[in-house]
Structure formats: C-alpha cells, structure tokens
C-alpha cells in the first residue's frame, strides 16, 4: 500500500514561516497541489509569491479571520 501524496491537494495554514512553510514546501516537493495560507500576507508573498504566480502546484492566499 502506497501513502503517496502526489496529485493530492493540501491546504496548509501558517505557511508563511516555520513548520507550516516547511510542511507546505515538502508537500510540493512530493508532488501535491498545495494552497499556502497565512494571516501575514506580506510574509506569505515574500516566501512563496513568485512560486505561486508560476504555473505549477503551488498557490497562496492570505487568511481572513473574523473576530466578534
């Protein structure tokens, strides 16, 4: 039985730095389609903006959080 993530889709939160960024990049390296999501839009753009604009398996989006 194979546990490959190639061709699967993942949404990784906290993807602008640290463990979230490392996990998201690892998934891309293993062939997954990955949505990088983080509240820090500037840092997210700095880390993966160019990759996300290129044709490929990487996309990024700022997280929008509503507080009551």
Image (cartoon, rainbow, N blue to C red):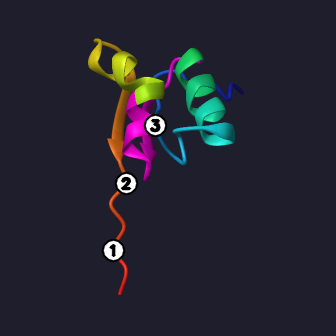
In percent of width and height, residue 15 lies at 53, 40
* Residue sticking out furthest to the top: 55
Query: Which residue is identified by label 3?
Result: 43
Tell which of 43 and 14 is nearer to you. 43
Q: Is mark 3 on a helix, strand or loop?
A: helix
In percent of width and height, residue 61 lies at 33, 42
**Residue 28 within the segment the image draws in magenta:** no
Real-space Cα separation, disc 2 to disc 1, in angstroms: 10 Å
In front: mark 1 or mark 3? 3
Tell which of 21 and 35 is nearer to you. 21
Q: Quadrant of the N terminus?
A: top right
Residue range (magenta)? 30-45
Q: Which residue is drawn at the image coordinates 49% and 25% (left, top)? A: 32
Query: Which residue is identified by label 2?
Result: 63
Q: Is residue 16 above or below residue 48?
A: below
Q: Which residue is drawn at the image coordinates 44% and 31% (left, top)? A: 34
Real-space Cα separation, disc 2 to disc 3, in angstroms: 12 Å
Image quadrant where residue 50 sits:
top left
Q: In this view, does 2 lie above or below 65?
A: above
Query: Which residue is identified by label 1?
Result: 66
């Amino acid at each position: 039985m194979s546990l490959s993530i190639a061709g699967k889709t993942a949404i990784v939160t906290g993807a602008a730095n640290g463990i979230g960024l490392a996990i998201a990049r690892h998934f891309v390296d293993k062939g997954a389609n990955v949505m990088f999501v983080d509240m820090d839009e500037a840092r997210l753009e700095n880390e993966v903006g160019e990759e996300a604009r290129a044709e490929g398996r990487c996309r990024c989006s700022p997280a929008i959080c509503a507080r009551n």
